Image (cartoon, rainbow, N blue to C red):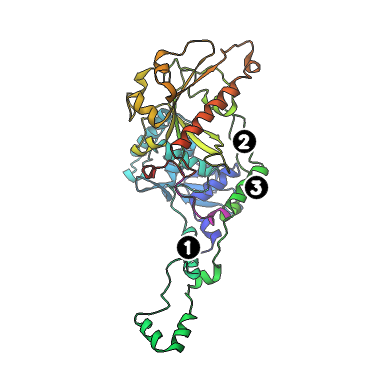
Amino acid sequence: MTSTETAQSDPLLNLRAAIAASHAPLLTTSEDPSSIADTEHSLARATHLVFTHNDDNIAFKISTPTRFISNDKSLSLRSIYHAYLTKDLSVQDGFQATTRLNEELRSRGAGADAEVQNLLFVEKTELITFLEGTDEVSEHIRPLASEAAAKDAVGSADVASGAAGGIATVPSGAEGARREDPRLAEILAGERRMGDRNSVLRGVRPTDFSPIRKHAADFLGRSRARPGGPTPIPSAPSSAPLVANMKKPPRSGIVSPIIMLSPSASSLIRMSNVKDFLEGGFYQPADSSAGGGMLQVSRTIPSIDPARPTRFILVDGPEQFKPDYWARVVAVFTTGQTWQFKSYKWTNAADLFSHALGVYVGWNGEEVPPTVRGYGRAVKTAQIDKWSAAQGERGRWRDREVVEGIWSAVEGSMRAKGWTREGPATAATR
């Protein structure tokens, strides 16, 4: 099977290409819909998902297993498409939408295998960034057969170059023969290690062009959106670029650091305004009614990975944390209220801030709370100018200076704790 055929037969890559082409697939009740009556709007009633972004329509059963693995189980195409449709909902709203869909499936007599699975926020983040073209691989996505073959070819190339494996040139007992027969010793000394047909056909120096592809995408239209605005969708009229991306060796072990916010209503930085603040260097009042869920911000951390921005995950609670996620927490925003830490792995502030940087953001000119002062150097204190509706964004020119100070403290803390581009300096994050 060729790489092109593999791409066409993979539902994840077809959904990725459809999103890149801004051409939504059709939910239908037949494999080849011939009329409007065959189209469907409900994931519970649909039987097929038809992709029309190419000249040839490609249809998949909605129950088709995909390469995305969660809890050692392949997610169905229905679960994948539902996760993408609900990507902008909060955690609570997304859970309710999943519950309603599963109830409808059960009412129609569907078995337990047909039900949609809820994803943890890290799993959902990696799925959405893969589908939107931000990341090429994920630890939760099983590689294609072509990718596995390419990896085997690299191993064969190592054998051919003598770097690994191979067959010993001198068999057992040959040392004695070499001493007895000088001519035989000369012949054996001229032998070399042999590889297989993969190493012969592909050579011994596989080239990875992924860094060049990343830089080219930035210059060819994948510009960053304004903080808080819509995420630009990369332009890809066909699945051809995806075929090239399949040949990239998987980027293994890369994890996103986590920043935790205070859920307190008195906190100046909340989920509703943190993205504008940390990415855009601009403060605006938080919406006290908005909370929960998860956000992402990107920031280049030169001492960690100068080649590309590091993606940070922002949450205001550990409700969906796995035990190993705590090793990825690099900063905790706090108001000094200790009840914030009751559900954390480290409930004592001294223990918490020995593992992650503390950040306090208050008004300029107001006194820092005594509890925050008591944390000492473990907490970065930042003070911003009070908000004035009359001045609006024009009066926020000092915000960027404050934000740069916070990022410098985060970078220093990550560097001191041994962070690299693959993640923290502990195997517990894998």
- Depth order, front residue of 224/262: 262
Amino acid beneath label 1: Ala
- The reply to whether dot 3 and dot 2 touch (C-beta < 8 Å) is no
**Alpha carbon separation for disc pair 2 and 1:** 35 Å
**Alpha carbon separation for disc pair 3 and 1:** 27 Å
- Indicate the position of residue 254 as horizontal and vertical percent values: 47, 45
Query: Mark 1 Cα within 10 Å, few/some/many (few <14, many 20+)?
Result: some
Q: Please tell me whether mark 3 or mark 1 is closer to you in this view.
A: 3
- The reply to whether dot 3 and dot 1 touch (C-beta < 8 Å) is no
- Depth order, front residue of 64/309: 309
Residue 118 falls left or right of residue 390: left
113 above or below 96? below
**Mark 3 or mark 2, earlier in chain:** 3
Badge number at residue 261 = none
Image quarter where the C terminus lies is: top left
Task: Identify the residue shown where x is 63% and y is 15%.
Answer: 392
Query: Mark 2 Cα within 10 Å, few/some/many (few <14, many 20+)?
Result: few
Badge number at residue 149 = 1
- Indicate the position of residue 32 as horizontal and vertical percent values: 52, 51
Q: Which residue is mark 2?
A: 224
Badge number at residue 216 = 3
- Indicate the position of residue 271 as horizontal and vertical percent values: 48, 24
Q: How many marks?
A: 3
Q: Quadrant of residue 369?
A: top left
Magenta region: 244-254
Q: Quadrant of residue 403?
A: top right
Amino acid beneath label 2: Arg
